[in-house]
Amino acid sequence: MSASFDPIVSPSIVSKALQTIGNADAKLTKVKATIAAEQSKAFNMVLDAMVIACDKPKALFLKGNAATNPARAQVKGMFDAAVEKGYLTKATAASYQTAFWIAFEQGCAWSADLNNKKTADKQAGEKADTSTKASGKVEITDIPALHKTLSKALAQARILNQSIFAADLVDLITDTWPDFKETVLSK
């Protein structure tokens, strides 16, 4: 048999507290939506300006990475500044920057989850090929071996026409290892 207790705190006080918490949560949700809309507006403003500044075919305009392409450098600088000012985390900035170049390349509006949508769309359109060889097990390695692997990953990305990913990967690698050189791998 379960024991029955009288409430220690009035149920009306608990009810009022829950109502206040619910109202605060609704306000927070509204503020988050306003912030997201303002961010989208700002990034789309820069995107529109970049589209106007594009004076050559997009593939040529996007060629390279932030170290070799002034357009990519400027956009990377904007997102790096947002991180430095504490407006975005480094991971969020990297995701937003990828979404920026996807929007530019596809001629659509920027949205925070654009790169996630592209990945989901790609995965939905692909079938797993079980006949492909999996990567080998890594037990012992060093930085030169890592550089060879990264170089191979860049080559694979380019073969798959993943130019935005390849450029983002080069930026990440050269930020970590400024002396990184892509090598031609032979099997």
Image (cartoon, rainbow, N blue to C red):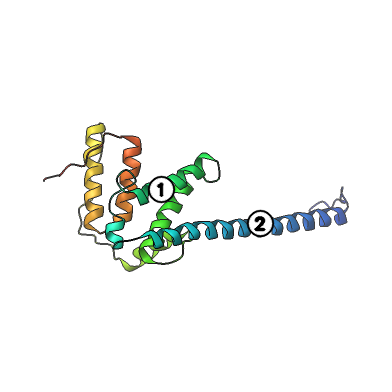
**Label 2 sits on residue:** 31
- Location of residue 119 in the rendering, given as x and y in whole percent from the top left corner: 38, 60
Residue 113 visible in the current orientation? yes
Classify mark 2: helix, strand or loop: helix
Q: Is residue 187 left or right of residue 3?
A: left
- Residue pictured at 34% horizontal, 36% vertical: 176
Residue 83 circle label? none
- Quarter of the figure with residue 26: bottom right
Query: In x, y percent, where is residue 45?
Result: 50, 59
Q: Residues within 10 Å of mark 1 (few under 14, many from 20)?
A: few
Quadrant of residue 128 within the rendered picture: bottom left
Q: Are marks 2 and 1 in contact (CB under 8 Å)?
A: no
Q: How many marks?
A: 2
Reply above or below: 117 against 88.
below
Residue 179, image x and y in percent? 26, 34
Report which residue position mark 1 lands on. 74
Relative to the observer, which residue lies in front, 82 or 136?
A: 82
Tell me residue 74's x, y (percent): 40, 48
| 104 sits left or right of 3 in the view | left
Q: Residue at x 63, y 59 (%)?
A: 34
Say which amino acid is labelled 1.
Answer: Gln
Q: Earlier in the sequence, mark 2 or mark 1?
A: 2
Residue 141 in view of the camera:
no
Q: CA distance from mark 2 to mark 1?
A: 29 Å
Specify the quadrant that holds the N terminus.
Answer: bottom right
Marks 2, 1: nearer the viewer: 1
| Residue kind at label 2, given as amino acid type | Val
